[in-house]
Amino acid sequence: MKQTRRQFLRHLGIGAGASLLANAGLPLALAGNRKDRHLGDETMHTSPDVELLIGDVLGFALTSDAWAGAFGWVNFRLHQAWHNGENVYYIRTDASDADFAAANRLVHVPLLNAALSVEGATSQLYTFTNGAGDQYPVVSHVPNDDGYSSAWQVHQVTFNGDPTVLNAADAIREAEAVGDVVVEPQQLVVNFPVVKWAGGELAEDTEKSSYLGTGPLISPVDTDNMQVNFKLHECYPGSRYIVTDTSAVPMAPMMSIAASAPTQLLGDVGATDEIWVFGNGIPGSGVMGFQPAVFDHSAGNPIWSPFWQHFTAVWTDESKATVVTSSDEIRALADAGDLEIFNGVPDMDQSMPPFIVNCPVPIKARNTFQPA
């Protein structure tokens, strides 16, 4: 049975003093050995109007004169893992557990716990309590795999004897079968989008003149310095976000992002929030060329999620269009007949649910959009 977000929150007891279970013994650092490269401290000084939410952010700018597009940039530290013996690189943005999120400076997203209630919504991320010195985490899937989800359930691996390097999920399962390791699934879901894998990576926008362009990155993934530079987009209320993947597999190439079909299941169990993009109205920096999108909630709210059910809002009389800055306004305008709301995009079969887009928010900042 489909579980709404609010039903899930009541089950957790959020708002009634309940706390999420900590994951005893789970290593706080999931990255293994890595090369850290920090930008100068001056890049991280923020004004009172700006809140940095993610500790792996190395630098950012809300806007830039270096390109024509109406977006800034945000530089993330990369982390390394293995998939079938090949290197994989990912970023870390969100976690379902409050203690883990605080210790790793990630955004706490209680709703992600709901992902564990439906089979297939998450991929598996294996971490090691007593692995070999050169052991990295292992992931079960990468983009272009049918089973790839950027929402990962963490599994803790412990060697019973002397550790050996395990660099594939199959190798871990084989070691478990013969008693060499114990694998313990954790009540922890993390949003760790993969940005580079064997045979592929998220694309650089070589034009930097429009929202989508040729990719979500400002520059190619830099594995030498373990950094990746994303386009940073404005959204209401007071949010700056990146785009990494979508459940809409046919649309992923057009959006130049990764496909993550299993994340569609997150909408069935209340692990998502809602985003509205505008299909007409006030010209601006949004994905369709109109005003910035509107989130239902801002990061840090207990019912916020980086996994968004995507809706398109269209003015029924475009001459009456104004800048809309909140979900309350959108719902009121829709109730009044001034906005028509479409699941996904207007040319999509409206009997289908909205698709999911993964849009982590590393920064909250005062909105600055001004109509031309």
Image (cartoon, rainbow, N blue to C red):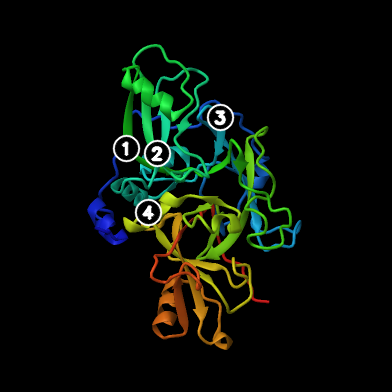
Circle 1 crowding by C-alpha within 10 Å: few under 14, some 14–19, many from 20 = some
Give the distance between the C-alpha atoms of the residues marked 4 and 2, in whole angstroms: 21 Å
Look at the picture and state if 266 lies above or below 150.
below
Query: Is 221 or 121 nearer to us in this picture?
Result: 121
Q: Are marks 1 and 2 in contact (CB under 8 Å)?
A: yes
Q: Do the residues labelled 2 and 3 touch (CB within 8 Å)?
A: no
Q: Residue at x 45, y 75 (%)?
A: 341
Q: Mark 4 points at which residue?
A: 266
Q: Residue at x 35, y 50 (%)?
A: 110
Look at the picture and state if 28 lies above or below 206.
above
Give the distance between the C-alpha atoms of the residues marked 4 and 3, in whole angstroms: 28 Å
Give the distance between the C-alpha atoms of the residues marked 2 and 3, in whole angstroms: 27 Å
Looking at the rendered structure, the secondary structure element under dot 2 is helix
Q: Which of marks 1 and 3 is nearer the N terminus?
A: 1
Q: Are marks 4 and 2 in contact (CB under 8 Å)?
A: no
What mark, if any, has residue 22 been given in the picture?
A: 1
Give the distance between the C-alpha atoms of the residues marked 1 and 3, in whole angstroms: 31 Å
Examine the rendering and report whether any part of residue 170 can be seen.
yes
Give the distance between the C-alpha atoms of the residues marked 1 and 4, in whole angstroms: 22 Å
What mark, if any, has residue 86 been given in the picture?
A: 3
Give the distance between the C-alpha atoms of the residues marked 1 and 2, in whole angstroms: 7 Å
Question: Percent x, y for residue 326?
Answer: 47, 71
Circle 2 crowding by C-alpha within 10 Å: few under 14, some 14–19, many from 20 = many
